[in-house]
Image (cartoon, rainbow, N blue to C red):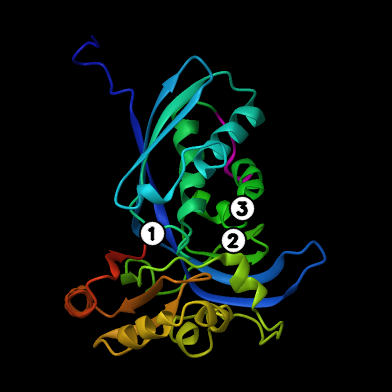
């Protein structure tokens, strides 16, 4: 048995939910990816990853939580792919037993899988006590998915290219702001939504203030997502009708939508109303994460 004063060998990371406060699609690249401009913000809450290091090189993954049934723990899971990728990059012989507690809906536009992959990288760097620069981790993360590099830091950032151009970006008043996430219980295919984009460049993103983001920002994937899942329009209508809302919009390729509120009290009242009227919808009350 371990000594009672010995440190707990288990470590924990949160896979913070990602929100696209605005998402402008500027064009399609020659490599098949889309050229994006987006302001990423992160919630204070998300999936939970816990792990214990092992010496046998194995990566063992177990999954639980309210949305755990929607995921496989096989080799294609992004947690396992991230772990194997980091092992290969570092030449690391150690392994880990990892538990993913899935709190965020699957295929929901809030970076669940990408956030899980990024949190896995952060977790294993700590578990294995290795030194790696954050920019190296972010570069390696791009192989796992376009959103993963930004999820490594999980702070408010401007993101460009297909996700490889990332820089911290401060919007006065945004960090710490009350934020509610709502998903109507439908999964949306990212590929099908991007395929439905009309290829019209509607202009650059100005993320200078919350007001500019609300009045001139947009999500160019909203129209094709609505074609796939019309219920998203119902979510947006409900959120925009709540007292105290500063901005409500769909995140990513959907179907999750978010609302930013002027106060915690306004968010709490809105969450109560939304839950009462739409008992099948998933609702999370949180705040924009401070870096």
| Quadrant location of the C terminus in the rendered image | bottom left
x and y percentages locating residue 38 in the rendered image: 57, 71
x and y percentages locating residue 128 in the rendered image: 48, 25
Above or below residue 62? Residue 151 is below
User: Position of 209 compared to 161: left or right?
Assistant: left
Which residue appears at 55% of the width and 56% of the height?
150
Above or below residue 108? Residue 77 is above
Above or below residue 116? Residue 90 is above
Residue 133 on the magenta segment: yes
Q: Which residue is mark 3?
A: 145
Q: CA distance from mark 3 to mark 2?
A: 17 Å
In the rendered image, which quarter is residue 126 located in?
A: top left
Range covered by the magenta-colored residues: 131-135
User: Position of 109 compared to 91: left or right?
Assistant: left
Residue 214 on the magenta segment: no
Main secondary structure found in the magenta portion: loop
Q: Nearer the viewer, mark 3 or mark 1?
A: 1
């Amino acid at each position: 048995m371990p000594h009672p004063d010995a440190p707990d060998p288990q470590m924990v990371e949160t896979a913070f939910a990602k929100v696209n406060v605005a998402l402008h699609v500027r064009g399609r690249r020659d490599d098949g990816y889309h050229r994006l401009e987006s302001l990423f913000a992160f919630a204070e809450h998300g999936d939970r990853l816990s792990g214990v290091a092992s010496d046998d090189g194995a990566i063992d993954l177990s999954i639980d939580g309210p949305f755990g049934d929607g995921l496989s723990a096989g080799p294609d899971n992004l947690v396992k792919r991230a772990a194997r990728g980091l092992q290969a990059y570092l030449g690391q012989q150690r392994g880990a037993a990892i538990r993913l507690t899935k709190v965020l809906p699957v295929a929901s536009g809030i970076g669940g899988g990408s956030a899980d992959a990024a949190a896995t990288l952060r977790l294993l760097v700590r578990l294995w006590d290795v030194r790696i620069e954050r920019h190296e981790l972010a570069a390696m993360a791009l192989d796992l998915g376009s959103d993963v590099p930004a999820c490594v830091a999980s702070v408010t950032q401007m993101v460009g290219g297909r996700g490889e151009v990332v820089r911290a970006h401060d919007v006065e008043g945004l960090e710490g702001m009350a934020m509610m996430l709502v998903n109507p219980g439908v999964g949306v295919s990212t590929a099908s939504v991007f395929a439905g984009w009309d290829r019209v460049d509607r202009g650059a993103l100005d993320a200078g203030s919350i007001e500019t983001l609300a009045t001139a920002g947009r999500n160019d994937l909203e129209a094709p997502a609505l074609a796939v899942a019309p219920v998203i329009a119902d979510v947006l209508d409900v959120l925009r009708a709540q007292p105290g809302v500063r901005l409500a919009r769909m995140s990513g390729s959907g179907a999750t939508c978010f609302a930013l509120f002027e106060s915690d009290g306004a968010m709490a009242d809105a969450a109560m109303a939304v839950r009462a009227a739409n008992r099948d919808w998933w609702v999370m009350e949180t705040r924009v994460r401070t870096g």
